[in-house]
Amino acid sequence: MTTVELLWNGLAAFLTLCIFSFLYKDNPFYKFAEQLVAGVALGYWTMLLYHTTFTDKVLFPIFQQGKLHYILPTIMGIMMWTRFSKKLAYLSRIAIAFYIGVGTGVGLPLYMYNYVFRQLQATVVPLNVSWLGFNSLLMVVFIICTLIYFFFSKEHTGAFGGFSRVGIYTLMVGFGASFGLTVMGRVALLVQRIIFLREYFIALFGS
Amino acid sequence: MNFYEKMLNIDRRWIYLVLAIAVILPAVVSFYVPVNVTPEVRRVYDFIEDLEPGDKIYVGIDYDPASLAELHPMAYAILDQCFRKNLRPVVATLSQFGAGMAEQALADVASKYNKASGIDYCYLGYKPYPAITIMLMGVDFRVPFPQDYYGTPLDSLPLMRYVHNFSDLSGVIDLTSGNTADFWIIYGYGRYFMPLALGVTGVMAADYYPYLQSGQIFGLISGIKGAAEYEALTGYKGEGLKSIPYQTASHVIILAFIIISNIGYFASRRREK
């Protein structure tokens, strides 16, 4: 590590320890690191949006490339901001209506295809005598049981209640898998910082 | 207060301390943990491995620094495989904080194989509104990205001269920590039928397995375990494999806590009865 890298990594190590100090209790070091992250992120994001949206989509095309048709979406964008004026707020509805209309028109068929039809198609597959077929059968049974659990127009008693109970267990298995993966993800964040601190201190003091 | 009740009311800071010791332990005493490769990770590896030198592939770095721990190792391993195979990755980010990390990963791996920007790979940078950007990339990369990240017009780049839209690419590998994965499934696969694989954080993984089963994605790399599997396949020695002993030690402690607290819970319930 060069001296410059050591200094930057030293700052990163200090901020990491500031954040970790919250595990004991809230303190000024934690607050400093938290507010620094929020401030840097906000500043970075503001400038990024200015350059990638305003410069790229308004200034550059209209004033440098002479693409005058970009004026129309620019006007609609300005209309969005009229929400802050009581007198002109109605103008923002036109722009929002256009945005929702286009979004729904483009998205709805694709959402239906990807989230409904393809998933249904993958759920109801031909059964055969194999582990794969057994898995498919289990999946169909558990899906029906889960749907029964969410069917509230009939009391959950008797055989119906039994299926509903299987539905609860199915949901619990799903939540358990999600929880396990979440633990893995959260621990990974801690581990990455520990590895970073270890390598930094080895670079600083030697192994 | 009996022993079981004491266990259930233990100060959380003791748990943090024990977990911290468990995580620090592998830093002091190193040990090896084998990594088993799952079929969904192997399919991503095989897909890239089967491509011919010169083929172009899109790699999306759609995550922010908060997910760096899980997804950056995947990015390094995948880019390493691409450059080793002499593929030509086209890289972009649809996450507002991803631009710097994507450039870092590309620069690090490209310099290892002496690959040049614009010739052996192309970095397009960041664009907001992922759904619109994906749809426009399907029409022509020049619409959302008139220039690459360094301000060079795409037509001036030898690599991008003949790359116009998704039909000029072999597939998409999207490493993501947010809803960009959904946009890639809906628009990238659903509209343009691009072969799509995802690398996701552990938190997201369970939500994306249904798409694997339905064939909407051909592979799924989930969390740090997935990254370690990919590194094991490619032989790339990165952060994924390095973190597995730490991960294992902390999981053992968490499991122990779960078992102890459940014993405490059931024992105290039995006493109440």
Image (tube, coloured by chain):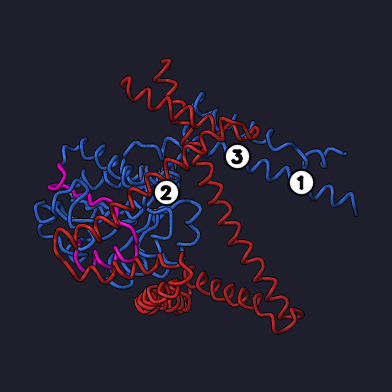
For the residues marked 2 and 1, what is the alpha-carbon distance in whole angstroms? 32 Å
Mark 3 or mark 2, earlier in chain: 2
Cβ atoms at labels 2 and 1 below 8 Å apart: no
Q: Residues within 10 Å of mark 2 (few under 14, many from 20)?
A: many
Is residue B100 rendered to the left or right of residue A126?
left
Residue lying at 78% horizontally and 48% vertically, measured from the top left: B265
Mark 2 or mark 1, earlier in chain: 2
Q: Secondary structure at mark 1?
A: helix
Check residue B263 in the rendering and tell me which mark sits there, or answer none. 1
Is residue A35 rendered to the left or right of residue B190?
right
Q: Amino acid at mark 2?
A: Gly
Chain of the residue that carries numbered disc 3 in the rendered image:
B
Chain of the residue that carries numbered disc 2 in the rendered image:
B
Is residue B268 rendered to the left or right of residue A162?
right
The residue under label 2 is B226
Mark 1 or mark 3, earlier in chain: 3
What color is chain B drawn in?
blue
Q: Amino acid at mark 3?
A: Val
Relative depth, front residue between B64 and A114: B64
Image quadrant where one finds the N terminus of chain A: top left
The residue under label 3 is B252
Q: Among the chains, which one is red?
A: A
Q: Secondary structure at mark 3?
A: helix
Range shown magenta = B116-142
